Image: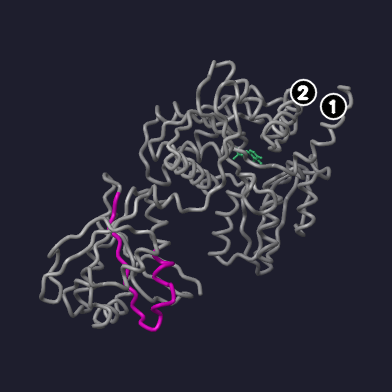
């Protein structure tokens, strides 16, 4: 059964009246009974467009079955009151309210970024309290004679769940302390361990794109990238798992076989290889052709660029903050490989929206300044404005550190320092880095620490993936080894 929540509409009024007027349903509710159409319509019209409440309908396989929502949404204090009420009696006891509650908490903590969600429940409402406990609410106190319920004073419990507690129970990639680096404590966040074919930041982004694909019932996916592309490897994996076709538009200039392209073959992706200047039109034509055939294609921008990709790294930032809270540690610096800048934009937005204190340093793997940094800045502004999060421009500027000394000769460039970083990370920490992304970032980080005399700090390196590229590098590593002897 697929459970979803959506905004309450005018058409839902009749159902609401039927549900709330049922004595079994309204035993612990505090409505002025009976509900009538006119009154409820007034309520609906009055509350339409309000941003301090979110009234939603719970659906099971597309059929409305109950009500859920947030009241008194208080942006200043970052909190809101939650309510839930199953309407269809035959649908109770099947875990629907629990799943819907999970979804509304996700909305409260991810979309609205609240710090707390709370509720009040009559002490006699045992069934509801079991549900609230299962969703993660904790009892914070007893409020005596807090309401008059069906003519008599009733006690209520106050329950709440904080953002920190909620985040701690969300899935997250591991953070491991690796050892010392120039008298700093070095930690790795292993986004390369995200499931789906060697994971990486493209997997973190693609998960959110595929949520859209699943929700929208799309039946094929079109994307863009070279034979080296981690993004295309991941997207072909996720498409194959769903049994939908994946079409990769690839530039003929970079089309030699790599481990990533072998994976695309393994997953049955369809490659359309054209000269780079034809890529744009080929994407347009391919999408048009699929639609003409009656298909429903979804286009994912190359590298997972855009607000959806940025959102994925806001979530990564949230995971880091949750780790910091739990372990009572503060990362002074966060380093990672920056390409299209989406990863960096997400981390920056996460930090700005939660008032974090880490220094976020993107090590460019290709683009030079000022362009590289400007692309990051544009992504940050685009995301924050979509979220209606007002942020001081100077603050955004200050938070965006994009260093471009390690771009080498562009994507796939290699030099002895980068090969040394690959050898060192594998030998010292048992972590595979590749010459296109993570080894450049690692070498850039080492140099940045040295140049800026940074010591005694907590340093987090986000491993953004690309492990198949590490295997492409292995041949070159071995050659260097033999020459050394
Ligand atoms: C794509 C990629 C990056 C760069 O990510 P952006 O969001 O494009 O900046 C870094 N590391 C790896 C392994 C990648 O595949």
Q: Is residue 286 above or below residue 224?
A: below
Residue 310 drawn at (x, y percent): 52, 44
Q: Which color scheme did the rendering employ for the protein?
A: one colour
| Residue shown at the point (39%, 70%) measured from the top left | 97
The answer to if 84 sits in the magenta stretch is yes
Secondary element type, mark 1: helix
Q: Which residues are magenta?
A: 79-101
The answer to if 431 sits in the magenta stretch is no
Q: Is residue 280 left or right of residue 70?
A: right
Q: Is residue 119 above or below residue 332?
A: below
The residue that mark 1 highlights is 480
Report the front residue among 429 and 112: 429
Label 2 C-beta lies within 8 Å of the nearest ligand 1 atom: no
Quarter of the rendered image showing ligand 1: top right
Secondary element type, mark 2: helix
Q: If you read the primary sequence from the N terminus, does the residue marked by circle 2 or circle 1 appear first?
A: 2
Tell me whether the residue at label 2 lies in contact with that at label 1, contact meaning CB atoms closer than 8 angstroms: yes
Q: Is residue 476 left or right of residue 244?
A: right
Residue 10 drawn at (x, y percent): 31, 72
Crowd rating for badge 1 (residues with CA inside 10 Å; few <14, some 14–19, many 20+): some
The residue that mark 2 highlights is 416
Res. 363 image quadrant: top right
Residue 467 drawn at (x, y percent): 71, 42
Q: Is residue 271 left or right of residue 157?
A: right
Res. 106 image quadrant: bottom left
Pick the quarter of the image with the C terminus: top right
């Amino acid at each position: 059964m697929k459970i979803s929540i959506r905004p309450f509409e005018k058409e839902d009024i009749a159902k609401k009246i039927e549900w709330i007027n049922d004595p079994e349903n309204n035993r612990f509710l505090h409505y002025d009974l009976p509900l009538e159409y006119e009154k409820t319509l007034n309520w609906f019209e009055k509350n339409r467009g309000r941003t301090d409440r979110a009234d939603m309908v719970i659906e099971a396989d597309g059929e409305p079955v109950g009500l859920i929502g947030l009241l008194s949404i208080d942006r200043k204090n970052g909190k809101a009151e939650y309510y839930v009420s199953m309407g269809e009696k035959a649908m109770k006891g099947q875990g629907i309210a629990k799943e819907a509650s999970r979804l509304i908490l996700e909305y409260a903590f991810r979309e609205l970024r609240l710090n707390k969600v709370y509720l009040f429940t009559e002490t006699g409402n045992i069934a509801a309290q079991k549900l609230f406990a299962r969703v993660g609410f904790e009892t914070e106190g007893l409020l005596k004679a807090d309401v008059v319920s069906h003519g008599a004073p009733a006690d209520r419990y106050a329950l709440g769940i904080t953002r920190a507690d909620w985040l701690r129970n969300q899935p997250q990639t591991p953070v491991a302390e690796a050892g010392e680096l120039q008298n700093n404590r070095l930690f790795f966040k292993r986004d390369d361990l995200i499931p789906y074919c060697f994971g990486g930041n493209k997997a973190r982004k693609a998960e959110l794109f595929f949520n859209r694909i699943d929700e929208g019932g799309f039946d094929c996916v079109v994307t863009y990238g070279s034979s080296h592309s981690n993004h295309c490897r991941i997207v072909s994996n996720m498409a194959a798992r769903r049994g939908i076709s994946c079409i990769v538009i690839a530039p003929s200039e970079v089309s030699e076989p790599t481990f990533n392209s072998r994976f695309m073959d393994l997953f049955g992706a369809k490659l359309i290889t054209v000269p780079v200047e034809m890529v744009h039109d080929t994407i347009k034509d391919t999408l048009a052709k699929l639609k003409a055939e009656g298909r429903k294609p979804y286009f994912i921008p190359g590298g997972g660029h855009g607000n959806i990709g940025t959102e994925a790294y806001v979530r990564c930032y949230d995971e880091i903050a949750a780790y910091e809270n739990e372990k009572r540690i503060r990362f002074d610096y966060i380093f990672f490989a920056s390409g299209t800048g989406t990863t960096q934009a997400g981390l920056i937005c996460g930090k700005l929206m939660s008032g974090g204190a880490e220094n976020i340093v993107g090590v460019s793997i290709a683009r030079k300044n000022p362009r590289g940094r400007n692309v990051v800045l544009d992504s940050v502004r685009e995301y924050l404005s979509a979220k209606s999060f007002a942020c001081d421009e100077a603050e955004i500027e200050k938070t965006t550190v994009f260093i471009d000394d390690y771009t080498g000769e562009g994507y796939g460039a290699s030099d002895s320092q980068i090969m040394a970083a690959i050898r060192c990370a594998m030998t010292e920490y048992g972590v595979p880095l590749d010459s296109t992304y993570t080894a450049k970032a690692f070498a850039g980080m080492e140099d940045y620490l040295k140049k800026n005399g940074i010591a005694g700090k907590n340093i987090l390196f986000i491993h953004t993936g690309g492990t198949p590229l590490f295997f492409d590098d292995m041949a070159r590593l071995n050659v260097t080894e033999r020459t050394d002897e």
